[in-house]
Amino acid sequence: MTAYDVIVLAGGAAKRLGGADKPAVRVGGRALLDRVLAACAGAGVTVVVGGRRPTSRPVVWTREVPEGGGPLAALGAGVRLTTAERVLVLSADLPFLGPATVDALLTAVGGGGGENGREGALCTDPDGRDQPLLAVYRAEPLRRELALLATEHGSLAGLPLRLLTGELDLVRVDAGPHAAFDCDTWEDIAAARARIREHGAVLDEWITSVKNELGIELDVDTDVLLDLARDAAHGVARPAAPLTTFLVGYAAARASAAVAGPEEAAAAVAEAARKATALALRWEAEAAEEQPRAEPSGEGAGTP
C-alpha cells in the first residue's frame, strides 16, 4: 500500500505580494514550490492545485472550482486525485519544510486502519497556532467532512479551513522554529533568503539545493569533504582543494555505478575522500622534510 499521497495548494491571489506568482518566487535559488516538493519526495501521488508551471519532479495538476475559491475548494479538487489512505496537505510557501517534519506527521497519524483513533495530525507554529495546510489527514474522514461541508453550504468555495479541522479528531505536532514559516509578504521572502545564508545554515542549504538541482539522492558527510579540501589546500596548493573534491566525486561515482544505491555511493565517497586525504598529508609531510634542506644555513653567505 502506498504510504501517503500529497496535495500541495499552489493557487491564491498572493495579494500581499502584489499579485506575484508566489509558488515561483525563489528562495535560495529554488522556487518555493520546488522546495516543498523536495520535502515530500516519497509520496505516491503528488497533486498540485494551481496553475501549471515547470517543477523539479513530476506532479498531477488540477484547479479548484471556481478558481480562486479558497483552500477548502482546492483541497476538495485535489483529494479526488489521491488514492492513499493518508493524505499530506501542504501550502506551497513553506521554504524550510523538510522530510523530518513530514515523517513526524505521518508517524503521529500512524499506519493504515486508524488504529490510534486519530483522523489526522497537524503542525502548530511556535506561537501554538494550528497549521491545517501543514498536516496529514486520513483520506476517508477527510472526504467525508468535505462532502458534508459542500452539502451544508452549497459548495466549498470561500469556506474557512477551521470548518474542516473543527470536525476532525486531530493530534497536534510541534513544527519546531522554522518548518511552519510561510511567505505571505516580501518581508517574509527577505527573511527567508537571509536565514538560509546564516553561518550555521548556509552549507546545509547549499548542499541540499545542489543535490536537488542535480537530481542526487545522497547523504554525504560534508565534514569529511571539508577536511579533505583543507588538507589539499594546505598540503599541496590552494587550487588543489576544489579539483581534489571533484576527483573524489568522480571516483566515487565510478565505484558505486554497479550498485547505484545511495548508501553504497556515500560509502564510496567516504573511501575516496580517505585515500585522497592520506595522499595530501603525505605531500605535506614530504614538503616539511625537504624544507630544512632547502633553507641556507647562513654560514659563508656571500662568500665566493
Image (cartoon, grey):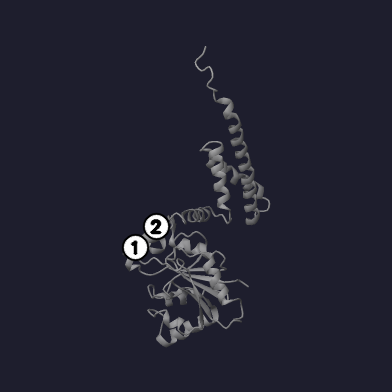
Numbered circle sitting on residue 74: none
Residue 180 in percent (x, y) is at 44, 69
- Tell me the kind of residue under disc 2: Ala
> With 77 as the anchor, is 3 left or right in this view?
right
Taking the spot 52% from the left edge, 68% from the top edge, the residue there is 101
Numbered circle sitting on residue 194: 2
> With 119 as the anchor, is 155 left or right in this view?
left
Q: Crowdedness of circle 2 by 10 Å Cα count: few (<14), some, many (20+)?
A: few
Instruction: Find the distance from the CA under tag 1 to the CA under tag 2.
Output: 10 Å
Taking the spot 53% from the left edge, 17% from the top edge, the residue there is 300
Taking the spot 56% from the left edge, 75% from the top edge, the residue there is 108
Identify the secondary structure beneath mark 1: helix
Residue 126 in percent (x, y) is at 43, 71
Residue at far bottom of view: 152
> With 181 as the anchor, is 106 left or right in this view?
right
Nearest the eye: 278 or 32: 278
Residue at far top of view: 304
Q: Quadrant of the N terminus?
A: bottom right
Q: How many marks?
A: 2
Position of residue 62 relative to residue 209, above or below, is: below
Residue 184 in percent (x, y) is at 36, 67
Q: Crowdedness of circle 1 by 10 Å Cα count: few (<14), some, many (20+)?
A: few
Q: Which residue is mark 1?
A: 187
Q: Quadrant of residue 30?
A: bottom left
Answer whether residue 83 is visible to the viewer in this image. no
Answer whether residue 16 is visible to the viewer in this image. yes
Q: Earlier in the sequence, mark 1 or mark 2?
A: 1
Identify the secondary structure beneath mark 2: helix
